[in-house]
């Protein structure tokens, strides 16, 4: 039997962050458990992406600390956070259009801690068969849903223990969102931890163990999937 640890993989303590003089995050507290899906929800502009960027070191924390796998990482550069095991799938996917599917995935190996710049193609293509068919196509020629699968594949080859996804369903067809949910659930079953930002409740419900709701740069509510009031939660969503 696979033993999955249920400890914390991530803790965000009293996180503040700004763009210039405008303060966006104002004391965010949250945690993510190992082998679980933790989902952050909230309307457009409340600071969800900013929080993930702060976690990745793309936006500086002005106050607060980030503990990942027992390491305090808020002063680490982005590449080091990735090497320690945080795989990031940004909002909008950020696929490189002029590189092939294979080359786009290969970029993700830069985040491996073992300096190996290869990945197991069979393993990745078993998760996302379409990427095998399109291996030599340019990333820019893929549909939104295919690009999303590519972005997840790119993060996975960095060998993360925490996969961070920013609105993976944005602008993609429902059929592909369900495929993505299935892949993520399979990864979680094998022990992967996931931090998800999502606005589509139907998708979030397929995965989530614990919800956090953000408003104006703060967490205003959190609840386990068993005790969450979905009608109330919907009031905090744009869609
Ligand atoms: N690079 C930036 N410079 C200045 N302000 C920014 C920048 N990026 C985001 N903002 C502002 O910060 C606030 C939070 O943005 P953020 O992208 O974190 O929201 P979000 O919750 O992810 O929204 P969405 O659901 O639309 O993705 C918004 O008011 C946004 O306009
Ligand atoms: Mg966002």
Image: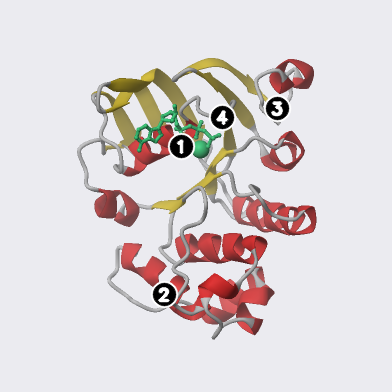
Mark 4 to mark 3 CA distance (whole Å): 23 Å
Question: Dot 2 corresponds to which residue?
Answer: 106
Of badges 4 and 3, the one in the foreground is 4
Mark 2 to mark 4 CA distance (whole Å): 32 Å
- Tell which circle, 3 or 2, labels the residue nearer the N-terminal end: 2
Residue 185 is marked as: none
- Left or right placement of residue 64 versus residue 229 in this view: left
Which picture quadrant has residue 122?
bottom right
- Tell which circle, 2 or 4, labels the residue nearer the N-terminal end: 4
- Tell which circle, 2 or 1, labels the residue nearer the N-terminal end: 1
Q: Is residue 65 above or below residue 159?
A: above
Tell me, yes or no, whether the two marked residues, 2 and 4, touch with CB atoms within 8 Å. no
Of badges 4 and 1, the one in the foreground is 4
Q: Quadrant of ligand 1?
A: top left
Viewer-proximal residue among 154 and 134: 134
Mark 2 to mark 1 CA distance (whole Å): 25 Å
Question: Dot 3 corresponds to which residue?
Answer: 225
Name the residue: 49% across, 62% down.
156
- Tell which circle, 4 or 3, labels the residue nearer the N-terminal end: 4
Question: Dot 1 corresponds to which residue?
Answer: 49
Q: Quadrant of the C terminus?
A: top right
Mark 3 to mark 2 CA distance (whole Å): 36 Å
Residue 44 is marked as: 4
Bin the neighbour count of mark 2 within 10 Å (Cα to Cα): few under 14, some 14-19, many 20 and up.
some
Bin the neighbour count of mark 1 within 10 Å (Cα to Cα): few under 14, some 14-19, many 20 and up.
some
Q: Is residue 121 above or below residue 32?
A: below
* Mark 2 secondary-structure assignment: helix
């Amino acid at each position: 039997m696979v033993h999955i640890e249920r400890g914390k993989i991530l803790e965000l303590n009293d996180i503040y962050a700004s763009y210039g003089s405008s303060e966006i995050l104002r004391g965010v507290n949250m945690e993510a458990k190992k082998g679980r899906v933790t989902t952050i929800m909230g309307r457009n502009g409340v600071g969800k992406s900013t929080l993930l960027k702060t976690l990745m070191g793309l936006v500086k924390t002005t106050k607060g600390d980030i503990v990942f796998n027992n390491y305090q990482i808020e002063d680490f550069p982005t590449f080091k956070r990735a090497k320690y095991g945080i795989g990031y799938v940004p909002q909008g996917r950020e696929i490189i259009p002029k590189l092939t599917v294979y080359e786009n995935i290969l970029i993700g190996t830069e985040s491996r801690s073992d300096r190996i710049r290869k990945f197991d193609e069979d393993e990745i293509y078993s998760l996302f068969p379409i990427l095998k068919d399109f291996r030599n196509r340019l990333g820019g020629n893929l549909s939104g849903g295919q690009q999303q699968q590519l972005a997840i594949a790119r993060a996975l080859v960095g060998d993360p223990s925490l996969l961070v996804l920013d609105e993976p369903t944005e602008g993609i067809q429902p059929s592909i969102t369900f495929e993505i949910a299935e892949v993520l659930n399979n990864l979680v079953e094998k022990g992967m931890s996931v931090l998800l930002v999502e606005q589509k409740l139907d998708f979030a419900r397929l995965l989530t163990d614990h919800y956090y709701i953000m408003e104006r740069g703060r967490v205003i509510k959190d609840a386990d999937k068993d005790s969450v009031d979905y009608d109330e939660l919907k009031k905090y969503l744009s869609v």
